[in-house]
C-alpha cells in the first residue's frame, strides 16, 4: 500500500487540509484572511477538496471527514521538511555498518532512512507499514513486529508489540519524535506510539534520534526518552544553544547536516 499524497492542485489546498486536520473545522473567512486570497478562491478550493472526499462543506466553512483524517494526516506529515529528512537519513546511513540489525520506528524521518537502507548489507526490524513496503520493494530483509494497528502513524503498537520487542536486540535503533526540549526530552502526542518507541529504545545497543529543526524547543503530551537514553542526535541545522549545551553535557554525538554559514 502506498502513501501518495492526495492529488490536490495547489500548496494553498495543502495548507487548507493541514488547518482542517489540526482544527477539525475551518472557516472560509479565516482562511481568506490567513492565505491572503478572496473568499471565493477559498470556496473553490474547498469545493475541489470536497469533491475528492477529503472535506465536508458546512455553513461558512468545512470540516475534515473522520474516515479520511488519519490517513491524510500521515500523508501530509510525510511531505513536510522532506529535504531535511532526506539529509538526516543520508547522515544516519553513515552510522550503519554492513551486518548490522537496525530497528526503525514508524516516523516519516525513519521512513526516509528505510528508502536508502539497501545501500548497506543489513537486516531491519520495523513497526510501520510504509517502511515494510519500502524494504520489501528494495530487497532488504526485515522482521515486522505486529500488534494493534495505530492508523495515525500506520504502525503497530501495544502489548503484543512491546512483549515481542523485549526479546529482540538490534544493534542500532533509529527513532524520531514530534518535539524536543532539554526539560521534557523527546515527546509525542500519541500514547500508543510513546510506548512502542520506548520499547524500541530499550532494546538497542545504540540509540539514534533523528530530528529536523522544526521539532526543537517544542513539547508534546508524553515523554519518549531523555537525552540520557540517546547516543547520537542527527539533525539538519545547528542546534539552539540551550539544546546543544544539554546534548554535549549528556555526552551525545551530534551530527548536523547543514553547518551554520
Image (cartoon, rainbow, N blue to C red):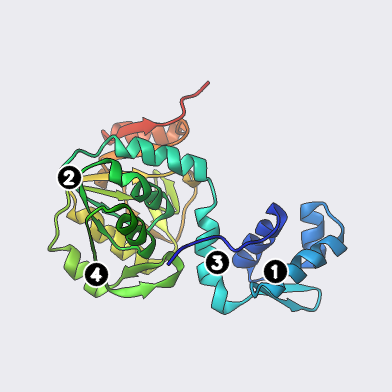
Q: Which of marks 1 and 4 is in front?
A: 1
Q: Disc 2 and disc 4: Cα gap in Å?
A: 21 Å
Residue 122 coordinates in the image, percent (x, y) = 20, 47
Q: Which residue is drawn at 71% across and 74% down?
A: 51
Task: Look at mark 3 in the image and give the residue it sits on.
Answer: 72
Q: Which mark is on residue 100? A: 2
In-image side of 16 versus 188 (left or right)? right
Mark 3 Cα within 10 Å, few/some/many (few <14, many 20+)?
many
Q: Nearer the viewer, mark 2 or mark 4?
A: 2
Closer to the chain start, of discs 4 and 3, is 3
Q: Which of 206 and 154 is in front in this view?
A: 154
Task: Assign a secondary structure to mark 4.
Answer: helix
Q: Nearer the viewer, residue 39 or 241?
A: 39
Q: Which residue lies furthest to the top in this view?
A: 261
Closer to the chain start, of discs 3 and 2, is 3
Closer to the chain start, of discs 1 and 4, is 1
Task: Look at mark 4 in the image and give the residue it sits on.
Answer: 161
Mark 4 Cα within 10 Å, few/some/many (few <14, many 20+)?
many
Q: Vertically, is 192 above or below 9?
A: below
Task: Assign a secondary structure to mark 2.
Answer: loop
Closer to the chain start, of discs 2 and 1, is 1
Q: Residue at x 14, y 55 (%)?
A: 169
Amino acid at each position: 500500500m502506498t502513501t501518495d499524497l492526495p492529488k490536490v492542485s495547489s500548496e494553498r489546498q495543502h495548507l487548507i487540509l493541514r488547518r482542517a486536520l489540526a482544527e477539525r473545522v475551518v472557516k472560509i473567512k479565516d482562511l481568506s484572511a490567513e492565505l491572503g486570497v478572496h473568499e471565493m478562491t477559498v470556496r473553490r478550493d474547498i469545493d475541489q477538496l470536497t469533491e475528492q472526499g477529503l472535506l465536508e462543506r458546512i455553513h461558512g466553512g468545512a470540516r475534515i471527514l473522520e474516515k479520511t483524517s488519519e490517513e491524510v494526516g500521515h500523508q501530509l506529515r510525510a511531505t513536510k521538511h522532506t529535504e531535511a529528512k532526506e539529509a538526516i537519513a543520508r547522515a544516519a546511513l553513515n552510522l550503519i555498518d554492513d551486518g548490522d540489525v537496525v530497528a526503525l520506528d514508524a516516523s516519516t524521518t525513519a521512513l526516509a532512512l528505510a528508502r536508502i537502507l539497501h545501500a548497506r548489507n543489513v537486516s531491519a526490524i520495523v513497526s510501520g507499514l510504509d517502511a515494510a513496503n519500502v524494504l520489501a520493494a528494495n530487497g532488504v530483509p526485515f522482521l515486522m513486529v505486529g500488534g494493534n494497528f495505530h492508523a495515525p502513524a500506520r504502525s503497530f503498537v501495544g502489548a503484543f508489540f512491546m512483549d515481542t520487542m523485549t526479546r529482540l536486540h538490534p544493534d542500532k535503533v533509529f527513532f524520531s519524535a514530534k518535539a524536543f526540549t532539554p526539560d521534557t526530552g523527546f515527546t509525542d502526542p500519541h500514547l500508543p506510539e510513546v510506548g512502542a518507541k520506548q520499547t524500541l529504545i530499550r532494546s538497542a545497543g545504540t540509540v539514534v534520534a533523528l530530528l529536523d529543526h522544526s521539532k526543537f524547543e517544542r513539547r508534546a503530551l508524553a515523554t519518549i526518552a531523555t537525552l540520557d537514553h540517546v547516543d547520537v542526535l542527527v539533525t539538519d541545522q545547528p542546534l539552539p544553544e540551550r539544546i546543544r549545551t544539554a546534548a554535549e553535557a549528556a555526552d551525545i554525538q551530534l551530527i548536523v547536516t547543514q553547518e551554520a554559514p
